[in-house]
């Protein structure tokens, strides 16, 4: 078994490697904007991926040493080969990309998004760390003004069965008969309820023959989850593989969020489950918007890429959909801030952040600061939450 020291070291190493990949991605965008040659781009990428190999990059001479190492030959004292940009220009790009990524890593503390990050980097021009040309190129490529969704796009229809579950969730006097009514709105949903009630998961020795009997066997809470999941699955149905995999992720986050909510003793597990199912609904809009296509940047987490090239994240777009669906304000806020829980007082946002992290998602940069804040806000402990896994019911719904 590896020692704690080795384990911590491996985490640090992985974090540095991820930082280098993101630095390379940002540098690549700048290089494209400056119309660098393919040779220059390749060299710059290699330098970015290796810029934490123990070679300091504080001035052009350091860059020269790194270039020499990569090219495998001594460079002329007067400059680099003619096909390459001057070392100062490549250094400028690399150092700005490195600093920008560090600014993005500090977002949980500094805040302000891409616009604020670029503003904080202006001092580097005066300090000679990077040129005004390189900073202006990054600013031109970055989306400081959010994209507009395609005019032909419309929010998907919120299923009636899901609306009924939402109303049940809000009604403290809801009865089993109300759950049955919600399930009857769609034969496919009713069939899913019957299938689960007669499954081995519930140790069914004798088959139930009616929907009412099935709901009685499953119970109020489980029946709500089955109806909500079955109702919302078609919303995510798409030929696009990003949405197909996204549905399984939504089920996983919903399942873990409901468990977390139950342990807080103050958050509603049903609301947590529905919020988890809907937390990434904004992806539907982005996938359907041609202007969102560049949001996939190799080496960068989706939220990082969305912030950089779209100026808006799927979380913000999901909140817009939630508003059109007239979801409760607390649920809209949770969807909007499930990646930035520090920006809202809604405790459900922190709960969704924890569930997202526990699901193993790599949608955004990991943040110990955010994780600890969310633990404090939900009064849960690290040791407690790290035990959560997707339940048997969650796996059954994912496979159904």
Image (cartoon, rainbow, N blue to C red):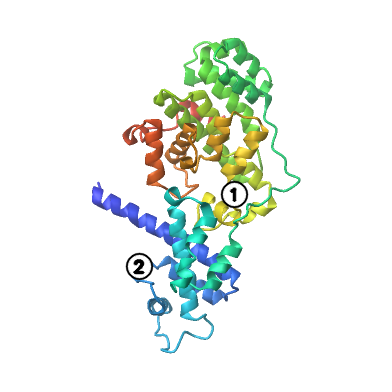
Please state which of residues 308 and 114 is positioned toward the viewer in this rendering.
114
Estimate the x, y position of residue 357 in percent, counting from the top left.
Answer: 44, 41
Name the residue tied to disc 1: 312
Is there a contact, CB below 8 Å, between mark 2 and mark 1? Answer: no
Please state which of residues 145 and 55 is positioned toward the viewer in this rendering.
145
Q: What distance separates the C-alpha of mark 2 from that of mark 1?
A: 34 Å
Estimate the x, y position of residue 226 in percent, counting from the top left.
Answer: 56, 23
Please state which of residues 74 and 138 is positioned toward the viewer in this rendering.
138
Q: Is residue 211 above or below residue 393?
A: above
Can residue 91 be seen at all in this image of the molecule?
Answer: yes
Q: Is residue 23 above or below residue 43?
A: above
Residue sticking out furthest to the right: 152
**Circle 1 crowding by C-alpha within 10 Å: few under 14, some 14–19, many from 20:** many
Please state which of residues 90 and 222 is positioned toward the viewer in this rendering.
90
Q: Secondary structure at mark 1?
A: loop
Which quadrant does the C terminus fall into?
A: top right
Q: Secondary structure at mark 2?
A: loop
Q: From the viewer's perspective, tell me whether residue 96 is left or right of residue 213.
A: left
Q: Is residue 54 above or below residue 69?
A: above
Estimate the x, y position of residue 65 in percent, counting from the top left.
Answer: 38, 78
Q: From the viewer's perspective, tell me whether residue 40 is left or right of residue 76.
A: right
Estimate the x, y position of residue 38 in percent, counting from the top left.
Answer: 56, 74
**Residue at left offset 56%, top offset 56%:** 308
Q: Choose top left, top right, bottom left or bottom right for residue 374.
A: top left
Can residue 399 be seen at all in this image of the molecule?
Answer: no
**Residue at left offset 48%, top offset 48%:** 364
Q: Nearer the viewer, mark 2 or mark 1?
A: 1
Residue 276 disc label? none
Residue 53 disc label? 2
Q: Answer with mark 2 or mark 1, whichever residue precedes in sequence.
A: 2
């Amino acid at each position: 078994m590896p020692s704690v020291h080795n384990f911590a070291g491996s985490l640090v190493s992985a974090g540095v490697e991820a930082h280098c990949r993101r630095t390379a991605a940002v540098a690549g965008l700048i290089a494209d904007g400056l119309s660098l040659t393919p040779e220059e781009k390749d060299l710059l990428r290699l330098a970015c991926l290796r810029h934490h190999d123990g070679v300091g990059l504080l001035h052009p001479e350091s860059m020269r040493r790194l270039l020499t190492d990569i090219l495998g030959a001594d460079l002329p004292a007067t400059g680099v080969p003619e096909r390459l940009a001057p070392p100062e220009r490549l250094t400028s790009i690399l150092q700005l990309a490195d600093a920008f990524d560090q600014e993005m890593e500090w977002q949980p503390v500094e805040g302000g998004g891409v616009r604020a990050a670029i503003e904080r980097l202006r001092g580097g021009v005066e300090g000679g760390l990077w040129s005004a040309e390189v900073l202006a190129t990054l600013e031109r490529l970055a989306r400081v003004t959010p994209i507009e969704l395609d005019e032909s796009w419309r929010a998907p229809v919120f299923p009636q069965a899901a609306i009924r579950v939402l109303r049940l969730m809000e009604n403290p006097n809801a009865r089993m008969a109300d759950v049955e009514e919600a399930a009857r709105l769609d034969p496919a949903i009713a069939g899913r309820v019957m299938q689960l009630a007669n499954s081995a998961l519930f140790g069914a020795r004798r088959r139930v023959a009616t929907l009412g009997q099935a709901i009685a066997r499953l119970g109020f809470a489980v029946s709500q989850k089955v109806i909500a999941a079955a109702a919302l699955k078609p919303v995510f149905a798409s030929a696009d593989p990003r949405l197909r995999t996204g549905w399984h992720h939504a089920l996983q986050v919903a399942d873990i969020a409901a468990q977390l909510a139950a342990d807080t003793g103050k958050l509603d597990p049903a609301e947590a489950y529905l919020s988890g199912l809907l937390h990434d609904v904004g992806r539907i809009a982005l996938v359907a918007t041609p202007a969102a296509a560049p949001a996939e940047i190799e080496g960068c987490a989706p939220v990082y890429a969305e912030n950089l090239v779209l100026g808006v994240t799927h979380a913000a777009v999901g909140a817009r959909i939630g508003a059109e669906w007239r979801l409760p304000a607390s649920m809209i806020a949770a969807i909007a801030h499930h990646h930035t829980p520090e920006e809202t007082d809604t405790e459900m946002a922190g709960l969704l952040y924890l569930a997202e992290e526990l699901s193993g998602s790599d949608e955004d940069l990991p943040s110990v600061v955010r994780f600890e804040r969310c633990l404090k806000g939900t009064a849960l402990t690290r040791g407690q939450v790290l035990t959560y896994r997707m339940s048997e019911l969650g796996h059954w719904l994912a496979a159904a």
